[in-house]
């Protein structure tokens, strides 16, 4: 190889090696794809539920006249995890058993599959309500029990959208009801 050819190759090689050491700028779509995904809770999926925190009502949707202290959660041990901030607090919240605290203060304990609630689990909502039952694809699905903070209980079959049909017990009486967006609609 001639001396001139060596110089030409060297002149073209140096800029290539020089450019390899610099990190390439990422596009916005690449940055969004690499950013960790935030887990959603039930209120993120239904905008009507976000208003629930700003007033008190009983299980039938009647506004309470004075602010009462919520009845202690039927799952008091889960409430202690909410004080530690959002995120996975115990176990395997990706694929397995775990306890996860949402930004809203809701606490879920149960099975996870692909970072979604799957199988049997319990959730204690920050407003004092709770749900225990089956989950599928991060939604209430199948047999379950919803306990309102006033102690009344709705038991039934929940559909994939989190709504359900079943019975509601209050004051020793049982009603045939449906639960939609955490509100009861009963036949009288």
Image (cartoon, rainbow, N blue to C red):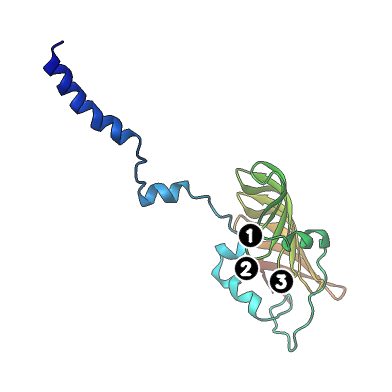
Q: Secondary structure at mark 2?
A: loop
Tell me the quadrant of the picture where the C terminus can be found.
Answer: bottom right
Q: Which mark is residue 181?
A: 2
Q: Which mark is residue 25?
A: none
Count of numbered circles in the view: 3
Residue, disc 1: 162
Callout 1 touching callout 2 (CB < 8 Å): yes
Of tags 1 and 3, which is closer to the observer? Answer: 3
- Please tell me which residue lies in front, 20 or 177: 20
Residue under the point 61% across and 55% down:
160
> Could you tell me residue 29's position as x and y percent?
38, 50
> Could you tell me residue 27's position as x and y percent?
35, 49
Q: Secondary structure at mark 3?
A: loop
How much space separates mark 2 and mark 3, taking CA atoms? 14 Å
- Please tell me which residue lies in front, 60 or 18: 18
Q: How many other residues sit within 10 Å of disc 1, few (<14), some (14-19) or many (≥20)?
A: some
Residue, disc 3: 127
How much space separates mark 1 and mark 3, taking CA atoms? 18 Å
Spot the residue most to the top.
1
Reading the chain from its start, which is encountered first: label 1 or label 3?
3
Q: Is residue 139 above or below residue 65?
A: above
């Amino acid at each position: 190889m001639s001396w001139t050819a060596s110089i030409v190759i060297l002149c073209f090689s140096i800029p290539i090696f020089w450019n390899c050491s610099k990190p390439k700028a990422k596009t916005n779509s690449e940055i969004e794809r690499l950013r960790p995904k935030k887990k959603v809770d039930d209120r993120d999926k239904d905008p009507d539920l976000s208003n629930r925190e700003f007033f008190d009502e009983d299980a039938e949707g009647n506004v309470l006249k004075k602010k009462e202290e919520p009845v202690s959660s039927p799952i008091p041990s889960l409430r202690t995890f909410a004080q530690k901030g959002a995120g996975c607090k115990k176990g395997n919240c990706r694929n397995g058993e775990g306890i996860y605290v949402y930004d809203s203060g809701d606490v879920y304990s149960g099975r996870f599959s692909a970072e979604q609630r799957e199988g049997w689990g319990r959730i204690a909502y920050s407003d004092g309500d709770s749900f225990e039952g089956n989950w599928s694809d991060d939604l209430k699905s199948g047999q379950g029990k919803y306990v309102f903070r006033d102690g009344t209980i709705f038991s039934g079959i929940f559909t994939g959208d989190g709504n359900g049909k079943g019975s509601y017990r209050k004051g020793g009486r049982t009603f045939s009801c449906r639960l939609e967006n955490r509100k009861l609609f009963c036949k009288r």
